[in-house]
Image (cartoon, coloured by chain):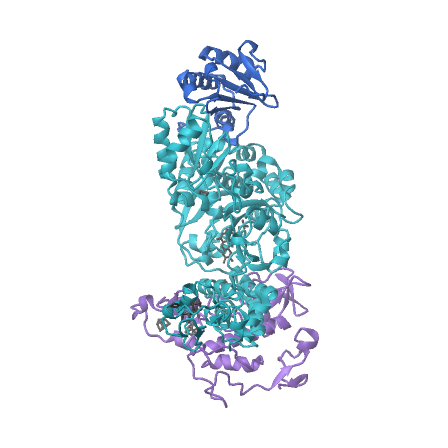
Chain colours: A blue, B purple, C cyan
Amino acid sequence: MAGKKKLRIQDLAKIREKTKSLMTIREGEGRARVTVHMGTCGIAAGARDIMDALLDEISKAKVQDIIVTTSGCAGLCSAEPMATIELKNQPPVKYGDLTPEKIKKIFVQHILGGQMVTELVLAVGSETVY
Amino acid sequence: MITFRMNGLDVKAEEGWSVLETAKFYGLEIPTLCFNEGLTPHGGCRLCLVEIGEGLKTKLVSSCTYPAEEGLVVRTDSKRVWAARRMMIELMLAMAPGSKVLQDMASRFGVTQVRFTSRNKECVLCGLCVRMCAEQMDAKAIGFQKRGLNRKISTPFDMRSEECRLCGACMYICPVCQLRCQGPNAEGVLCNGCLTMDPSCLDHYDDLQCWMYDAGRCGTCVREKT
Amino acid sequence: MKHYRAHLLVCAGTGCVSCGSFKIKEALEKEIKKRKLQDEVQVVATGCNGFCERGPIVLVQPDGIFYQLLTVEDVPLLVEEHLLKGRPVKKLMYVPPDEKQPVPKMKDIEFFKHQRLIVLRNRGRIDPEKIEEYIAFDGYEAMGKALAEMTPETIIAEISASGLRGRGGAGFPTGRKWAACAKEKRTPKYLICNGDEGDPGAFMDRSVLEADPHAVLEGMVIGAKAIGAVKGFIYIRHEYPLALKRVEIAIAQARDNGLLGEDILGAGFNFDLEIVEGAGAFVSGEETALIASVEGKIAMPRQRPPFPAQKGLWGLPTVINNVETWATVPNIIRRGADWFQGLGTESSKGTKIFSLVGKINNTGLVEVPMGITLRDVVFGIGGGIPKGREFKAVQIGGPSGGCLPAKLLDLPIDYESLTAAGAMMGSGGMIVMDDKTCMVDIAKYFLNFLQDESCGKCVSCREGTQRMWEIVRDITEGKGKESDLPLLEELAQVCKDASLCGLGQTAGNPILSTLQYFRHEFEAHILDKRCPAGVCTKLIRYVVLSEKCTGCLSCKKACPTEAITGSLKEVHSIIQTKCIKCGACQEACRFEAIESQRDEAIQVI
Ligand SMILES: Cc1cc2nc3c(=O)[nH]c(=O)nc-3n(C[C@H](O)[C@H](O)[C@H](O)COP(=O)(O)O)c2cc1C
Ligand code: SF4
Ligand code: SF4
Ligand code: SF4
Ligand code: SF4
Ligand code: SF4
Ligand code: FES
Ligand code: FES
Ligand code: FES
């Protein structure tokens, strides 16, 4: 923060809103959890780009409570890059063969909107595909 | 004017008086050692203790430092006060058995044993000399040093002080550097030569009830020390 | 600032820093860069997590994974496995005593599970050197509310209604203290934050100052508005360099942002803070001594009344509160007195920080709700006594606290219960002792501390603590007399009764409580001349157990004074008059044939 300008009470709330969005994940809670599978195969298939695109979207959307984690190889290398979306109190949903465009769509429609992007879904629920 | 109760008496004190000053004004005797009228009170010797408060919530405070407060309830000679006073005398005697002031005090308050090994020092750290030197002689040549067992009175760096003009006021006021008691047991830790009587009312009333306020010295309601 | 998917919260409290946490932080940053994760993962230095014995500590959020006892060598593995592949590293996790499976998440670890963080809510969560992180977690909201919406009266009413009591020792109701000072007409008025913390082994105030300095600042601004103070002083001991640094940074940041100084938050209120560095003794934490010290005089307590609220710093009305007390204030203003009221017991509200040390599995700093039982702290959070030994006592309240025995384990922790049991809340020290601890020795230890720290003004305290210490020392050396115990009790009582300040007034506790609950140990030392716990060297006797001795001669060789006789394959024996009780023979014997505390040993004399 610059620091030259003296804060007013309403500024305090603004700073809080701005920084809080970046900090809530320190509480370990959120409305949604996105797991990007970052095994060797995932990274080779472009999981990195998916991650970048996702973080970018989250920043742009200014949402606070989305947790992004990574996991190892999901054992389904053919469908990589993959990601799992868990909304609060809902079964996890797996998406495969992602591209930055697809993850953006998933972000808007599923994570923010709560509607599964059915055409991209690999599996729903804790039933394993691997 | 501040009004409060002392030994069941309603007393009035001027703003700024201590409990001790008020007691003196009314002729109530409270023993003191580190107090001197010409010097600021120090509150170190704890001989001037009085019990304040009522019921279960009473406590002991040093009357030389405690300000007279509206509505205060003070007892100058309760059992608890005497027990603490006797212990203070015993502790100080074990420091400096040579002090006649303390020896007299021991007989007066019926201290008949010293259960601690004597340190045979020549100071009880009452601080009278320090305040005398600073406040009356305007020299500030001596002061307290260190804490706990190592506490002592000395000049800075223990060297001959330029500030001291050898006026002797510090020795004059010291309760220890005086001729020691020449009573029957002059060499012992405790002399008790002038000890005879003990007021008997303390055990009954938990208060010294002597209306002559002579702490048992008239001999009417005292019992012989055993 | 940007959105990171993971935050690595590296503990940078004094404990972890001394174990090298800054090196860990550097290594993490380097490794993260190497793996090109620097835009996804943020490394943050936080304040003490309270579990310093496990340091260096790193918490990975949002997963809540708790890594401990890290070394720089562990860093590449951690980054590769956890951050890249999302596989938390088991071997760096915490394994509870007597168990094999690690506990990955911080919130599942017993040590953290039972705690209730209010004062320490930001510990291990924010970077204490960044004001915006404090603000993000509702920091300065309470101050804004106090300055814009509340009057001094409503602030004091709120604090009074919350039931907050001073955390510095005596437990005086904070609202009452503020009200008394607000009533005074003379100005200027001052505030002091007491961060002297002279108790040996205590570090709760240090931890608050290090982990969340802004909370103390915020509390003080609120207090300033309540009593109408213009200036405050934060007294921090010189031995706390990290706390000093963080508070300094916090004050500078607050000033830069208009949260301290003139016209705070544009609400037309002026207040500024200054740090006073103290190099004091234990007694300089006493409020009147501390005030003298801030004024530049010798730190010696003086008579109260007049209380600081009437005549404090430079004779002007002053409110002095403990660090923890100040840090609690914003929470009450922000969340309301009713919320605070709901925590704790009838007479003691809220939470209290304790430093849990001694013979206990999990040592550290814990914040628990008032009213929690000693058992929950010792066996729940603390994880019980190491090596399956037996719990004997817990010493509570700092050097002049008391020792409570096993039968009081279900005692709820609150001001009144502790005092009634002969201990006190004090500043929150808690030392756990097992059956190898000698209570006479413990009493001696604390008396030694007190006689050394007594400022020496009062005969009752200076001479009283010294004489008590001498008597107890003699008892531990086998020179005790039967008349010693009543004399000790008399001295302890008079010391409490007759002394001027809190030090002398509580100095009898170590003796009175140990005599109350462990009198038999004193009697064993005095009457039988033995130390049941086998601690007081002068009262131990080493003997050879004839049924176990193989006559191997190793003890004989080990003995420096040739106190052991015997020849090969014969039962050896120890000549007590020559033995200097060094214990070398016991260590040398491979057959556990040398005992110090068996009946045989006791019957020798
Ligand atoms: C010998 C002695 C040492 C003390 N040390 C401290 C200390 O280190 N920190 C502290 O906050 N209070 C200490 N106190 C208590 C203070 O005198 C005072 O009560 C306290 O700072 C008031 O704040 P509170 O009402 O918030 O507890 C000490 C008291 C005594 C008698
Ligand atoms: S003799 Fe020296 S030390 Fe003593 S009072 Fe006089 S000036 Fe002070
Ligand atoms: S030298 Fe005398 S006057 Fe000075 S402190 Fe000692 S006893 Fe008191
Ligand atoms: S009670 Fe002890 S520490 Fe306190 S003023 Fe008296 S001598 Fe000093
Ligand atoms: S070392 Fe042990 S076994 Fe060997 S002689 Fe000594 S007591 Fe006996
Ligand atoms: S304790 Fe030391 S001195 Fe005594 S017998 Fe054993 S080795 Fe020898
Ligand atoms: S005369 Fe009051 S304490 Fe000494
Ligand atoms: S300093 Fe890291 S846990 Fe205390
Ligand atoms: S063989 Fe040497 S002591 Fe046993």
Q: Position of residue B82 (x, y in %)?
A: 60, 74
User: Which quarter of the rendered picture does the N terminus of chain C lie within?
Assistant: top left
Residue positioned most to the right: B204
Residue C467 visible in the snapshot: yes
Along the line of sight, which residue is nearer the eye, B122 or C584? C584
User: Residue C398, relative to residue B78: is it above or below?
Assistant: above
> In the rendered image, which quarter is residue C4 located in?
top left
Q: Is residue A48 left or right of residue C372?
A: left
**Can residue B47 be seen in this snapshot?**
no
Q: Judge whether C144 appears above or below A50 on screen.
A: below
Q: Position of residue C175 (x, y in %)?
A: 60, 46
Left or right position of C566 against C347 = left
Count of marks, rendered view: 0
- Residue C569 in percent (x, y) is at 42, 71
Who's the residue at 35% across and 74% down the image?
B167
| The image quadrant in which ligand 8 is located | top left
- Looking at this view, is A14 or C544 the one in front? C544
Picture quadrant where residue B11 is located: bottom right
**Which residue is painted at 58% across and 35% down in the image?**
C334
x%, y% of residue C471?
50, 72
Which residue reaches farthest front? C569
Q: Is residue C27 above or below residue C505?
A: above
Q: Nearer the viewer, residue C88 or A69?
A: C88
Q: Name the residue nearer the viewer: C373 or B139.
A: C373
Establish if C487 lies above or below C372: below
Q: Which quadrant of the view contains residue B18?
A: bottom right
Of all residues, the one furthest to the top in this rendering is A119
